[in-house]
Image (spheres, rainbow, N blue to C red):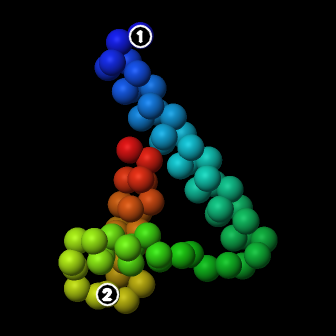
Amino acid sequence: MTTGKTLLYGLAAGAAGVAAMTLAEKLEQVFTKRPDSYVPAHTLERLLGLPHKPDEERLALNWTMHWGRAF
């Protein structure tokens, strides 16, 4: 298998894993009524030295960190 093909398989596997975990988490939240976690956004905010924002304004950061860890 070529390096490019291996890399492509790895990226696809990472994306599939994050999608499966996200689906399971959202399903669990329906039953437990647990709110979304903004810990990924808090972490990325600190790593990048960004100013503190309320959670309602962190959705893009949250998804960036959430999906970015797969790749």
Q: Dot 1 surroundings within 10 Å: few (below 14), some, or many (20 or more)?
A: few
Quadrant housing the C terminus: top left
Question: Which residue does the numbered mark 2 point to in the structure image?
Answer: 53
Query: Residue 43's image quarter?
Result: bottom left
In x, y percent, where is residue 68? 37, 53
Q: Dot 2 surroundings within 10 Å: few (below 14), some, or many (20 or more)?
A: few
Quadrant housing the N terminus: top left
Going by the image, does 43 lie left or right of 49?
right
Sequence order check: which comes first, mark 2 or mark 1?
A: 1
Q: Residue, x 48% and y 42% (percent of image)?
A: 15
Numbered marks: total: 2
Q: Amino acid at mark 1?
A: Met
Going by the image, does 50 lie left or right of 34?
left
Q: Amino acid at mark 2?
A: Lys
Going by the image, does 63 lie left or right of 34?
left
Query: Residue 49's image quarter?
Result: bottom left
In x, y percent, where is residue 60? 35, 68
Query: Residue 44's image quarter?
Result: bottom left
Check disc 1 and report its element: helix, strand or loop: loop
Check disc 2 and report its element: helix, strand or loop: loop
Residue 68 numbered mark, or none: none
In x, y percent, where is residue 65? 38, 62
Q: Residue, x 68% and y 78% (percent of image)?
A: 34
Residue 16 to residue 62: above or below: above
Question: Which residue does the numbered mark 1 point to in the structure image?
Answer: 1
